[in-house]
């Protein structure tokens, strides 16, 4: 009996719906172009998802707490690009680790600045992030540099093709799964654990559900915001550095068009824009759906511009499912009676 | 007699020049259900806030568990086992039942990591203490108001409450749910947990109180054993004047042959079925029923907010189609919602603006500007007619008391000169004094020719205002009475117990206590 309820809940969950969408999409594309069902497509899709996943994992807790932030992409661009230019000036020849360390620390500070402005001056999260978005990109272009930089330190050049798994693909020959998949996986697991098993993480949901009550219950809004914004800054920096090494150049305006795509993936993953809900599994599936659409449109020969259109249509369809459900529940729930006939 | 849990002596609290509490003393003993009654502004909420440590009194002493507190903080108050259940219940709608119950425990013990097994265990224990089973992994947003309240109580008990303060706990509950709540309060009593029950509803106070305390204008005017205090006495002490509820004059309603409104076989899936009735001119027609009987849906359907699946409406004999609010307004049907704050008023706008909002199209010039002169004249006339107590119509509605806010809602609809007015719980959350005045107003309106449909589960209210009363059950009109045929007790019985034998049984136990 209880199991039945559990299954029913699973089937009605947002995660399950988005999983079905992902499955349906993949099958459709595979039927149109069997080339989709190859190891190389799988590895490529995952590779292009890595950075988006990391960005989305960093943003998710803020969305759950009821905030919308777009500055994370600017933090990613500025921390990665500035770190690179700094190390290049120093004549650094080592590996990627120092990049992650310096950019990561800078990212945390950038995130904490958002949190400080939001908690200290009671500014709306979105307003602060809008300002920071513009400010960081501007800072990067004006003070650090305005052109893409292709000269990588010796120790980092090989990073782009370190694979944890390789396979033979009949069409393209040897193909591999990049090691940074593990990075995304690890960060995802960490946020999942943070949101589900720490009191701070539950506080994130509590704030999103009812901020007043959260304060009254004794959650420290300030410390929760500092933690989740710090995390967002760190994750953004990691994403920025990873993206640069995967594409083998540093771009001062990287991701500038992407913040809404990441937000779309999170919403597609079942998070409410008003806060209070959202999950790592859903977010992961949301990112994958967008990446699969992206890849599919290339494989089926549909112009790339269509990708945005299709994602938009899916978002509308998907977000209207819970709304329809609520509407039906409202009609039914106005009275709980069961008609005698 | 045992030591009181809390004793306050000679409390005085001023806000600016206004004395909110004047030399008030009160003691609450273990296992006691103490009812605190008073009109809005009588000082009830100030006292609650002093007991819970939110306000510091200007003068007076507080003793909790025999310990003297000169300055009581909320932390002290909670530490001494005093828990306030606010009207919003302090719950998280997006979290599960289990987590809502256990979350304070988690925070109080400064746990950094969540152990979900323990959360479930704590929640189960908490619910068991009030003999309740609820699905632990259901989200609170999917629960009824009554269940949410019980969760709030379970939370309070888990915090080792010795005194639970309930602020207007029955406002959003149906009669059945009120009975369930009273059972919980009595269970608490057996555990030695006291309840301070703050309410407007005098019949409930009579039912649950061991001791009744009445405040008026910041002073305690009555504090005695609840037995032997009847509702009239309570009303007298609350208002300081005699409210005459015995010889009300009802204006004679019109003829059945030329009705104002005829409703034929109205049906809406999952709400009501084959509802037929007539409303005469000059008549107040009461529609009552439990929550879920379809009464609210019927009200919304008559106002076009829930379009019906089938059935016909005739206004003054002519067929009328009402599928939208606009059509209802065009047919001169007005609707006063039960939640005036959310659905009826713009609290931060002025009284004038609120009154004229529904007739704004009649007050604009050719180029679309509002004639502010005319607007002011119209609204001051309504302020006078409805006796809204305010120094100026330019003040925001927020500054008015509940009773006066309700008058603004009524004025807003009366300004449209409706033929038919649907009132849904017009005095929910309104104090006794204003309530009597609103009832008088309803009778006056009906004598002026407006047909009124009054949806309410407040039985005395129905008897104060209605010519006829329809009783809804499971989406159908089950019974119809003329007011003279029956008395309040009989209607109460019919409303609650007729279709549910198990409830009758528990009610018997209830009476046997």
Image (spheres, coloured by chain):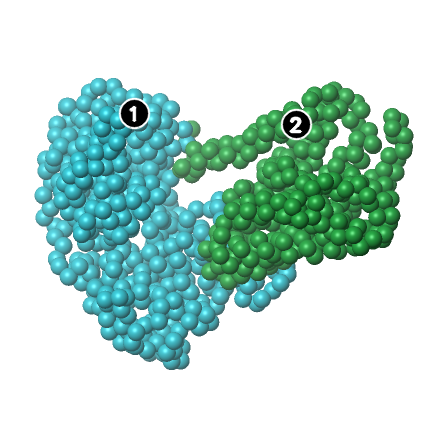
Image position of B424 (left or right of A81): left
Q: Quadrant of the N terminus of chain B?
A: bottom left
Same subunit: marks 1 and 2: no
Q: Nearer the viewer, residue A2 or A51?
A: A51
Q: Nearer the viewer, residue A219 or B395?
A: B395
Q: Position of residue A33 (x, y in %)?
A: 77, 21
What chain letter is assigned to the residue under label 1? B
Question: Which numbered dot is residue A307?
Answer: 2
Seen in the picture, residue A141 relative to B97 is either above or below; the reply is above
Image position of A60 (left or right of B301): right
Q: Quadrant of the C terminus of chain B?
A: bottom left
Q: Label 1, on which residue?
A: B327
Q: Nearer the viewer, residue A103 or B493?
A: A103
Can residue A334 be seen at all in this image of the molecule? yes
Location of residue B251 by image quarter = top left
Tell me, what hue is chain A? green
Question: Looking at the colours in the rendered structure, which chain would you say is drawn in cyan?
Answer: B
Alpha carbon separation for disc pair 1 and 2? 44 Å
What chain letter is assigned to the residue under label 2? A
């Amino acid at each position: 009996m209880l199991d039945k309820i559990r299954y029913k809940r699973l089937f009605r969950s947002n995660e399950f719906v988005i999983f079905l969408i992902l499955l349906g999409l993949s099958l459709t594309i595979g039927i149109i172009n069997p080339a989709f069902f190859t190891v190389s497509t799988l590895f490529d899709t995952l590779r292009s998802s890595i950075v988006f996943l990391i960005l989305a994992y960093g943003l998710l807790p803020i969305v759950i707490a009821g905030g919308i932030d777009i500055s994370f992409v600017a933090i990613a661009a500025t921390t990665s690009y500035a770190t690179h230019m700094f190390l290049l000036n120093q004549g650094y020849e080592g590996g990627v680790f120092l990049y992650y360390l310096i950019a990561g620390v800078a990212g945390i500070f950038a995130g904490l600045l958002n949190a400080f402005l939001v908690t200290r001056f009671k500014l709306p999260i979105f307003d602060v992030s809008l300002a920071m978005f513009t400010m960081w990109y501007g800072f990067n272009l004006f003070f650090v540099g305005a052109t893409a930089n292709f000269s990588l330190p010796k120790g980092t050049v090989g990073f782009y093709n370190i694979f944890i798994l390789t396979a033979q693909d009949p069409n393209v020959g040897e193909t591999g799964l990049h090691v940074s998949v593990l990075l995304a996986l690890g960060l995802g697991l960490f946020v999942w654990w943070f949101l589900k098993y720490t009191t701070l993480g539950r506080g994130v949901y509590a704030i999103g559900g009812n901020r007043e009550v959260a304060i009254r219950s004794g959650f420290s809004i300030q410390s929760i915001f500092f933690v989740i914004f710090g995390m967002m800054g760190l994750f953004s920096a990691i994403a920025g550095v990873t993206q640069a090494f995967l594409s083998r150049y540093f771009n001062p305006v990287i991701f500038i068009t992407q913040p809404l795509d990441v937000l779309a993936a999170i919403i597609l993953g079942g998070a409410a824009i008003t806060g209070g809900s959202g999950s790592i599994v859903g977010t992961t599936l949301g990112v994958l759906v967008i990446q699969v659409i992206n890849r599919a449109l290339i494989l089926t020969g549909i112009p790339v511009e269509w990708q945005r259109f299709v994602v938009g249509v899916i978002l509308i369809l998907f977000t209207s499912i819970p709304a329809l459900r609520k509407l039906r529940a409202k009609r039914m729930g106005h009275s709980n009676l069961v008609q005698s006939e | 007699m045992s030591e009181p849990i809390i004793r306050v002596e000679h409390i005085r609290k001023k806000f600016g020049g206004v004395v909110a509490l004047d030399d008030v003393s009160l003691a609450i003993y273990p296992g006691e259900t103490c009812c605190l009654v008073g009109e809005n502004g009588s000082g009830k909420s100030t006292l609650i806030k002093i007991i819970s440590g939110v306000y510091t009194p200007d003068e007076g002493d507080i003793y909790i568990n025999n310990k003297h507190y000169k300055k009581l903080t909320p932390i002290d108050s909670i530490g001494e086992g005093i828990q306030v259940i606010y009207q919003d219940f302090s719950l998280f709608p997006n979290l599960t039942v289990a987590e809502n119950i256990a979350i304070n425990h988690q925070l109080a013990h400064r746990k950094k990591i969540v152990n979900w097994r323990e959360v479930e265990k704590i929640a189960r224990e908490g619910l068991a203490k009030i003999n309740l089973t609820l699905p632990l992994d259901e989200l609170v947003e999917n629960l009824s108001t009554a269940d949410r309240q019980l969760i709030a109580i379970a939370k309070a008990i888990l915090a080792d409450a010795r005194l639970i303060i309930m602020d207007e706990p029955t406002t959003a509950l149906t009669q059945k749910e009120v009975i369930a709540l009273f059972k919980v309060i009595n269970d608490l009593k057996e555990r030695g947990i006291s309840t301070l029950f703050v309410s407007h509803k005098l019949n409930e106070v009579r039912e649950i109180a061991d001791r009744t305390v009445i405040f008026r204008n910041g002073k305690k005017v009555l504090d005695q054993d609840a037995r032997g205090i009847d509702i009239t006495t309570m009303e007298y002490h609350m208002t300081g004047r005699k409210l005459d509820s015995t010889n009300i004059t009802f204006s004679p309603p019109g003829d059945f042959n030329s009705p104002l409104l005829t409703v034929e076989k109205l049906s809406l899936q999952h709400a009501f079925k084959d509802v037929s009735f007539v409303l005469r001119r000059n008549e107040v027609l009461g529609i009552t029923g439990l929550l879920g009987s379809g009464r609210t849906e019927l009200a919304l359907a008559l106002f076009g907010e829930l379009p019906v699946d089938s059935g016909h409406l005739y206004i003054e004999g002519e067929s009328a189609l009402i599928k939208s609010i606009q059509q209802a307004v065009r047919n001169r049907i007005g609707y006063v919602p039960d939640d005036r704050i959310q659905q009826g008023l713009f609290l931060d706008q002025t009284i004038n603006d609120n009154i004229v909002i529904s007739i704004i199209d009649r007050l604009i010039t050719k180029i679309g500007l509002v004639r502010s002169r005319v607007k002011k004249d119209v609204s001051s006339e309504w302020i006078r007619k409805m006796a809204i107590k305010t120094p100026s119509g330019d003040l925001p509605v927020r500054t008015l008391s509940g009773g006066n806010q309700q008058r603004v809602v009524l004025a807003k609809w009366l300004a449209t000169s409706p033929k038919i007015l649907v009132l849904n719980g017009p005095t929910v959350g309104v104090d006794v004094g204003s309530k009597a005045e609103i009832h008088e107003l309803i009778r006056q309106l009906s004598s002026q020719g407006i047909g009124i449909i009054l949806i309410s589960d407040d039985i005395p209210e129905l008897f104060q205002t209605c010519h006829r009363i329809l009783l809804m059950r499971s989406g159908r009109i089950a019974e119809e009475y003329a007011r003279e045929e029956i008395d309040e007790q009989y209607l109460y019985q019919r409303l609650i117990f007729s279709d549910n034998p198990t409830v009758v049984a528990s009610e018997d136990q209830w009476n046997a206590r």
